[in-house]
Amino acid sequence: MNLKAYDIKEVTVNDKFWSYEQKLVRDKVLPYQWDILNDRVPEATPSYCMHNFIAAGKLNKRRDELGKKFIEPKFTYRGFEALPEDPKNPKDDEFYGFVFQDSDFSKWIEAVGYTLATHPDAELEKIADEAIDIVCDAQLPNGYLDTYYIINGMDRSFTDLRDHHELYCLGHLIEGAVSYYKGTGKDKLLKAASRFADYVDSVFGPEEGKLKGYPGHEIAEMALFKLYETTGEERYKKLAEYFIDERGAKPLYFDMEHPTPKGQPYKIDFYHQAHIPVREQDEAVGHAVRAVYLYSGMADMARISGDEKLLSACEKLWDSITNEKMYITGGIGATHMGESFSFPYDLPNDTAYAETCASIGLVFFARRMLQLKADRRYSDVMELALYNGILSGMSLDGKSFFYVNPLEVLPEACHKDERKFHVKPVRQKWFGCACCPPNLARLISSIGTYAYTKSDDTLYVHLYMGSKLSINGTDVEIESTFPESGKVTVRTKSSSKEPVTIAFRIPGWCNDTYTVTGTDKLETSVKDGYMYVSGITDNDITFDFEMKPAIVTADPRVREDAGRYAVIRGPVVYCMEEKDNGKNLRSLNIDTDSAIREEITDEFGLPVTVLYAEGYRNIPKPGDIFISSLYQKFTGFETNPQTIRLIPYRLWANRGEGEMSVFI
Amino acid sequence: MNLKAYDIKEVTVNDKFWSYEQKLVRDKVLPYQWDILNDRVPEATPSYCMHNFIAAGKLNKRRDELGKKFIEPKFTYRGFEALPEDPKNPKDDEFYGFVFQDSDFSKWIEAVGYTLATHPDAELEKIADEAIDIVCDAQLPNGYLDTYYIINGMDRSFTDLRDHHELYCLGHLIEGAVSYYKGTGKDKLLKAASRFADYVDSVFGPEEGKLKGYPGHEIAEMALFKLYETTGEERYKKLAEYFIDERGAKPLYFDMEHPTPKGQPYKIDFYHQAHIPVREQDEAVGHAVRAVYLYSGMADMARISGDEKLLSACEKLWDSITNEKMYITGGIGATHMGESFSFPYDLPNDTAYAETCASIGLVFFARRMLQLKADRRYSDVMELALYNGILSGMSLDGKSFFYVNPLEVLPEACHKDERKFHVKPVRQKWFGCACCPPNLARLISSIGTYAYTKSDDTLYVHLYMGSKLSINGTDVEIESTFPESGKVTVRTKSSSKEPVTIAFRIPGWCNDTYTVTGTDKLETSVKDGYMYVSGITDNDITFDFEMKPAIVTADPRVREDAGRYAVIRGPVVYCMEEKDNGKNLRSLNIDTDSAIREEITDEFGLPVTVLYAEGYRNIPKPGDIFISSLYQKFTGFETNPQTIRLIPYRLWANRGEGEMSVFI
């Protein structure tokens, strides 16, 4: 199959839940982020992002003025993250921040593009236009646009593909430019991104004399496919395909580039998914974000080219992630060593990495798999990640963020145990390496484009949210109560009177317990977790998917969860917090026979369903000590009944620092 | 109190258990180790230890021959571990191995000294004498003796106390020299060590112009006290006291030495127990081996000087370790980050460090605390560490060793999860950094000196083992069945007819369930876990301490052990192995109400008691999946009864690679 995604302007989201999140992005995240990009937030690590573009622009101007007299800077390496010698006086002509700092602008402009598409805002658009002018001024005459090398010395550009993110910056620039173009119709940035892509195309490829490399951090692949689908230019598709096909070819490019990866903490090629050709890969390995970004590009290619082998690899990799390496929250990347996947079933709760960006990438991958096949195993995971491991990345006020989303937290360990320094017990203001907050912004502001795909006459509904869109002349209006309850109403109005089909996902979590009305006179069939309702013209269809609390266990091979339980309700995963349940959550047990009670609370802003489970706290009865007071002879437990209060995982750590645990 | 330790020659060990281990050391470990020191074991990492002494000796000879024409080598830094450019052709005049490589000889000669004391062996003594000649030839005329600086350039000696182990090498040299002197009566090495100590004394101290530093890796402190007690020379005591008193004084010496400890993975001063003066320390922190070596020296000083503040610090540190930071195996050091103590109650089983050397150091500390006060909280821990976390460090054949002693192992994790690369699922042949094997050798060969202390007329029995010794003219012969059963027979024969007192430890693990015979006509009283039997002349006293299997739980604050159980019998901690119980040990549960059955097996060489506990394997019953096959709705457990076989923890991994777990 080759299903189309909806463009941002084709879907109007008007949903209690998601519109709230989108408003947060518009009102809080984007303005804050713009201040960050311009180093105007005193308490946050300076970004230097716009600083760098301005510095590169000045250099360009001097080059123009001096002509042949201009002396190109000779490359000097100043670290993976460069900081001003005097932090109070950054120099006008130096590059600061991480080697990939440019991409922060690109992610911001991407979110701005989506936002302007649905919520025009002249003031924001003016700021964005000015920012784009600054960025475009930084572009070299040949199209190259990465300020790290423009400022530090172009003679070393494309000599460290493995670590230096130039192609990553290209990828994000394209994503940002396409979004802004679709949101505003303005193509200045799109042209700049295309020119950079053209330049890259002149440098890389199978032709003699061209470099045979590929991105160290993937994203250019899927971005180039997007650019191809936006502009219709075949060369972008070819370049993306080249990057995908070349990956893992022997001899390995990164090994040639870095002949002695001595002292590296991980296997480099593995880490970059460049250890073997992509069509031979069947286990998700290495850096989790890179992995799902690559797989997203592979899925694009499989769809566009009809490459069956690639599709098969994508399916295997999807299964590897979701059946062996995914937290119940939709988090992926079990180890902070290389921010990577661990081995199958190794899913420790308290040292999890589960980066917000990785779950976002999993959504990218899922949407692309859904364009190949409408199967709820993709959409169920997409929904799971969104309501849990992704939204947990942002605080209720939109001002602080988690990079790492653990499933169990003891604050003392985060502060004192260096093995858990990557785990933060409360969300942080901003990060020097700020991938997650802007990634959240661009995902949330474009959430409507993940909810649906279409063929000529069929609309596929993957996520339920209040929204309006159309399919083949039929307007579709959806009302949803997700994730608080499972009611969905769909009203269609056909102008053409040509009947259409709508394929509704039946969420896996309801285990086929649902009611549907309004389909009596329509033809229905169920396949791969979707109910296909055909013959729709002007209809009212309602679903009620059973959304009740349930206790879930992990595969027994997940050692850290053996004998433990998680509580879910619909797609929402719950957790215990110290605030509600006291210290030492590990000593709490749930009575699996008792009913779990629901309650709606207003304490988190929007009305939220919290749960109460009957349980008990087990403390060993006093016994003779064995050797020291740390150990004692077992004489039974003092079992104190305790009602356990559970809140949605995405909302944890919004009420101060304390213990948290998903598994009980 | 100021109790005396017994000298090696004063105790004859003739014990089923310990004599077997000592024979292993004599027959296997010492010869193997000597081959290692001389780089004659092809499959092991070369040590270069004797190579370095020979190289330094040659340099000395050239210096003698050339006199003033000799040009001293100018220091060149070649790494913390230097390796030959061509591993097949190490150069005669270069230093190789770790900066502390000399200490490997010292540990070997220490074990040789103890061994010769109790088991004369002309051939071994000849080898040792020749080795000592080589070592002494390496000593500089001024007494300095660390081949790292002698070869690489003396101009930088004592400029990196924090990292460069010169004073550590001094400490071990003294320990070795004293042992060899006591074992053989030969004082060549003792004189060399004393001269090195004299030189160090001329460099360090409170006097103007002297360095105000102290060891980066402690051991010199306790070694210098030993040298003082052996030679009677006050200056060694003063130097040791200086090192202890100066530690942690502001400004911190290591900070002055290393003004920018940038990129260091841990807080340096904390790591070296040099963050505050030792008398103010009340929490065991930093590198675990260094910590207990320091505390041992502090306990020596508290005893010798009668310093109450120091004694109080020692007691607090002891409590900090044993009540908050000790594994049930007697292992200490919960994190491999810096091989360090973690925060209180943080005792993860599968990422434990629990270095063999650290538990050995804990025994050193315990024996010294026992010289201050006969209290079974010290001797119980000493025994626990010996029978569990220390002997687990060596294979049954004495040829392979654990550095790290985890309480739970999944071999796949050791191979694939970089967070557990420090944990090995099977013992290793030898280590480049070979502290643990020789440390085991020196402890085991001198085990008799840990079993007893004495005052003028009282013998304190801390450990039970077959042995002969005397107290104030009364010969004492002890027969013991430890650790297989709790029977101990003590026969005394007095030549002086002056009655003596024997204080017998009543092991904490029997919780005062024991029988004693032969004391009817003697005066007995119990204090701090010791039964004092007075009026002994010619007597037969027998004890039978109840040694039966018991289930033990950890303090509920130890999160990783919450809801889990360990099985012990007497001082022996048991574990499950995959070999006996199948894969996925985490799904096994113990029925805490059933009796645990004992069986004696011959499968480990010596007869050993193994245990059988009734239990069950819990696997969730099939239920609806939640999102992916990794998670499912809970519908109950399939509970399959299974008898769990448990073997002593010290014997794990002697039957191939597999899962292991202490806690069930």
Image (spheres, coloured by chain):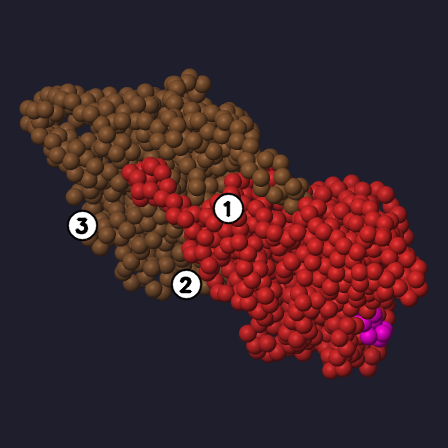
Chain colours: A brown, B red
In the foreground, A250 or A512? A512
For label 2, count other residues whose C-alpha is less than 10 Å away and answer few (under 14), some (14-19) or many (20+): few
What's under tag 3, amino acid-wise?
A: Gly
Numbered disc in front, either 3 or 1 = 1
Query: Residue A410: image x %, image y %?
Result: 54, 36
Label 2 to label 1: alpha-carbon separation: 63 Å
Q: Label 3 marks which chain's residue? A: A
Among numbered discs 3 and 2, the one appearing first in the sequence: 2
Is residue B170 in sight in this rendering?
no
Q: Label 1 marks which chain's residue? A: B
Determine whether A22 is above or below B302 in the image.
Answer: above
> In this view, which residue lies farthest toward the top?
A602
At mark 1, the secondary structure is: loop
Kindly identify which numbered label has been placed on residue A256: 2
Query: Residue B545: image x %, image y %?
Result: 69, 53
For label 1, count other residues whose C-alpha is less than 10 Å away and answer few (under 14), some (14-19) or many (20+): few
Give me the residue at 20% from left, 46% from top: A303
What's under tag 1, amino acid-wise?
A: Ser
Kindly identify which numbered label has been placed on residue B306: none
| Location of residue A561 (image quadrant) | top left
Q: Which residues are magenta?
A: B177-188
Residue under pointer 1: B594
Residue under pointer 3: A306
What's under tag 2, amino acid-wise?
A: Met
